[in-house]
Image (cartoon, rainbow, N blue to C red):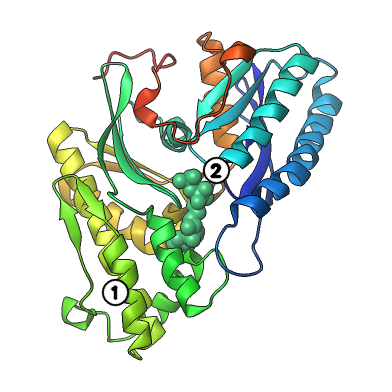
Amino acid sequence: MRVLGIEGTAWCASAALHDAETGSTRIESDPYEPDSGGIHPREAAEHMSEAIPRVVETVLDAAESEYGPNAIDAVAFSRGPGLGPCLRTVGTAARALSGALDVPLVGVNHMVAHLEIGRHESGFSNPVCLNASGANAHLLGYHDGRYRVLGETMDAGVGNAIDKFTRHVGWTHPGGPKVEAAAAEVSGTDRGADAADLLDLPYVVKGMDFSFSGISSAANDAYDDGEPVEEICFSLQEHVFAMLTEVSERALSLTGADELVLGGGVGQNDRLREMLETMCAARGAAFHAPDPRYLRDNAGMIAVLGAKMAAAGDTLAIRDSRIDPNFRPDQVPVTWRDDESS
Ligand code: ATP
């Protein structure tokens, strides 16, 4: 089974070919990089219309030269969640390709794909997943045929909360890697060695849910008050990642799971991975963070999950293939898992 995956929920126009027999995945991506500010939905949509045909053509050409004219067995695409105008471009491209190649169409939930790529790479049987991405932040666990949302942000996604601060400072998008680099300047010194060195920022965890809107505003205020930006970045990371680590530990504890996988672009952050790894080691749980190319948005994860769904017969008729900007992971009946884990 060879599946062409297409991703374009927000900033990353991407196409991939996954060969389920060999396990190989080729990914071609073309990111949208705003000149200033954050992601502008109209500009992002224009980027998708230009870049999706390019990345698809590159992957298709390579597939056909390697496997011949019947290289593709199914076309999988991100149905949501994401920005409506971007998703519509991806949906239209996927429907057209499925028709032209005369192969089934598979509609993939982008957040479930972030989870499944970690399960696929790690070989874990029934992990809890922390999805730490730009527009989202939630804990997922499998129960009775679906991935259930165990806890989630009550307002901003984790990456968006960090990017809100970097926009205030005047740094270009994406802000996460810049915050990580600035924070590293503090963590490499004596400062940052204990909690007394942290700026006092809001830490909001309520049961399994958490909130980031207050911390973005407080970080902006600290910057306006003249606190050194490296100190703010350091404290911002420590607070935000501690919240995510606390709820991840609670999810493991409440479900009895002993495996944690990470998903989403913020998962590229070394400090977040270090905190999760330390927490898992302390409670005897296994931890897996996928390769960075599978953490940020990418079509590889869409093609990998698309192949599993297609093999399970979980395909879409064109009339049922509309996109869904608010598509939640717990709306997806899990058809492709053959275990009985609950
Ligand atoms: P979603 O998957 O929820 O639709 P998204 O489309 O914004 O989110 P992702 O690729 O998952 O995309 O994540 C992008 C986010 O990751 C951005 O907010 C960016 O700042 C953040 N990010 C990237 N690298 C790092 C890093 N090293 N540290 C912290 N954050 C990072």
Q: Relative to residue 296, is residue 2 drawn left or right?
A: right
Inspect the image, locate mark 1, and give the three-letter code of the amino acid beneath it: Ala
Residue 66 image point, x, y percent = 82, 26
Does 317 sit left or right of 30 as displayed? left
Mark 2 and mark 1 in contact? Answer it, CB < 8 Å.
no
Which residue corresponds to mark 1?
A: 218
Locate residue 335 relative to residue 6 in the image: left or right: left
Up/down of 309 relative to 231, above or below: above
- Describe the element under mark 1 as helix, strand or loop: helix
Badge 2, how many Cα within 10 Å: few under 14, some, many 20+?
Answer: some
Q: Gap between marks 2 and 1, in whole Å? A: 28 Å
**From what the image shows, is residue 72 above or below residue 57?**
above
Q: Tell whether 306 sits left or right of 115.
A: right
* Numbered badge on residue 87: none
- Give the quarter of the figure containing the C terminus: top left
The residue carrying mark 2 is: 83
- Residue 23 position, x and y percent, is 59, 27
Relative height, residue 218 to residue 155 (above, below): below
